[in-house]
Image (tube, helix red, strand yellow):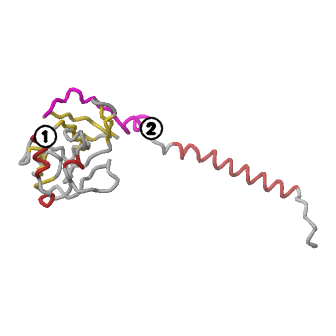
Amino acid sequence: MAKDETVEPSKRDFLYLVTAMAGVVGVGAASWPFIDQMRPDASTLAMASIEVDVSSLVEGTSLTVKWRGRPVFIRNRTQQEIETARAAALADLKDPLARNANLVDDQPATDLARSAGEGRENWIVMIGVCTHLGCVPLGQAGDFGGWFCPCHGSHYDTAGRVRKGPAPENLAIPSFEFISETVVRIG
C-alpha cells in the first residue's frame, strides 16, 4: 500500500463502532442505580450541619445538642473557668494537641486554640464523647471543674482537655462557627 492511499471504512467497521457505543451506554445505564444508591439520603445530609441558638445560655451554663448521632457540649464559660484553663501548664496535659477541627494543623492545646477564638474565649463547643471508651461525661464535675466520665474516671478541665484518668485524648472539637451573635453552626 502506498503512503498516500487511504482505506475506506467498511460497513463492518461502522457496525463495530455502533455496537461498542451502544454497549457503553447500556453499561452506564445499568450501573447508574448502583452508583446513585451510594449517595447519602436526605436525612443524612440534613444532619451534616446544625444551627443552635445560644442566646439563652448565660455565663456559667451549658447546653447539650445532638449532631450526627453524638452529643455536643456548648458552654458559655465564666471568667474564672477561662482563667483556670489558661493557667494550666501545657506540660501537665496528657494530650498536648488542640484536637480542633477548625484548625488546619494541630496546635498546642492552649485554652484559646480550643475555644471559639479571639473575642469569644468564653464559648467552647466539644463533642461530648469520652475518648477512652465512648461514654458521655458529666458536665461541671471532676477534679478540674470541667467534665468527668464516671465509667472509668477520666477528668477533663474547663477547656475539655484530659487531665487525669485513662482517656488518651482531649475531647474533640467539631468544625463550628458563629454565624451571628447568638447562633452557632456546627458542621
Query: Is residue 26 shown left or right of residue 178?
Result: right
The residue that disc 2 covers is 41
Q: Position of residue 26 (x, y in %)?
A: 67, 47
Residue 100 drawn at (x, y percent) = 28, 50
Are the residues tagged 2 and 1 within 8 Å (C-beta)? no
The amino acid sitting under disc 1 is: Gly
> Relative to residue 23, is residue 58 depicted above or below?
above
Q: In the rendered view, does 20 fall on the left or right side of 56?
A: right
On-image quarter of the N terminus? bottom right
- Can you identify the residue that label 1 sits on? 139
Instruction: State the separation of the CA atoms marked 2 and 1.
Output: 34 Å
Residue 135: in magenta span = no
Residue 17 drawn at (x, y percent): 78, 55
Helix, strand or loop status at disc 2: loop
The span picked out in magenta is 41-59
Q: Is residue 55 magenta?
A: yes
Of residue 43 and residue 99, the one placed in the foreground of this image is 99
Identify which amino acid the numbered label 2 is placed on: Asp
**Label 1: few (<14), some or many (≥20) within 10 Å?**
many
Which residue is pictured at 15% across the width and 53% down the height? Answer: 162
Give the quarter of the image for residue 76: top left
Q: Secondary structure at mark 1?
A: strand
